[in-house]
Amino acid sequence: MTAILRRGPSRDSKQPSPHEQGEPARLDILSIEISGETAVARVRDDYLGLTFLDSLSLLLSEGRWRIYNKLFNVEGPATVGTPGVD
């Protein structure tokens, strides 16, 4: 499966993206389960200095996957770009 990720602010976000802030980006796709025109993805990402574990519900609409629900958990401080931490 090919994932297409867009960098930049969301239409509704008031926060700049990590790219706009010059921060290193981290986006780990942990799992994707597809059933017909619905899917669930688990993603780990760093944003605003924190690491998040996101659960995304997606719908296939007009040939594109669209996120319709997001749950998140803050796991702790971000580690990308931290010296001595891989």
Image (tube, grey):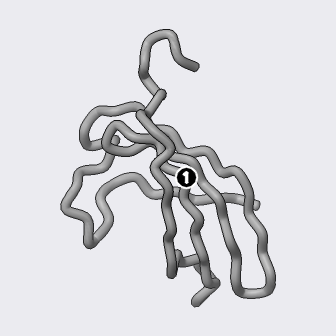
Q: Nearer the viewer, residue 82 or 2?
A: 82
Residue found 51% across the figure and 78% down from its top: 69
Tell me residue 60's x, y (percent): 64, 84
Q: Is residue 74 above or below residue 11?
A: above
The residue that disc 1 covers is 53
Quadrant position of residue 24? top left
Residue extending furthest toward the top: 84
Q: Is residue 6 above or below residue 20?
A: below
**Residue 47 image position (x, y, % from top left):** 38, 45
Say left or right for 2 vs 26: right
Using the image, determine if residue 14 lies above or below residue 67: above
Residue 11, percent from left and from top: 28, 71
Residue placed at 65% from the left, 51% from the top? 29
Report the residue at 31% width, 43% height from top: 48
SS assignment at label 1: strand
Amino acid at circle 1: Leu
Q: Residue most toward the left? A: 14
- For disc 1, the neighbor class at 10 Å (few under 14, some 14 to 19, many from 20) is some
Residue 55: give x, y in percent of width and height: 59, 65
Is residue 69 shown above or below 15? below
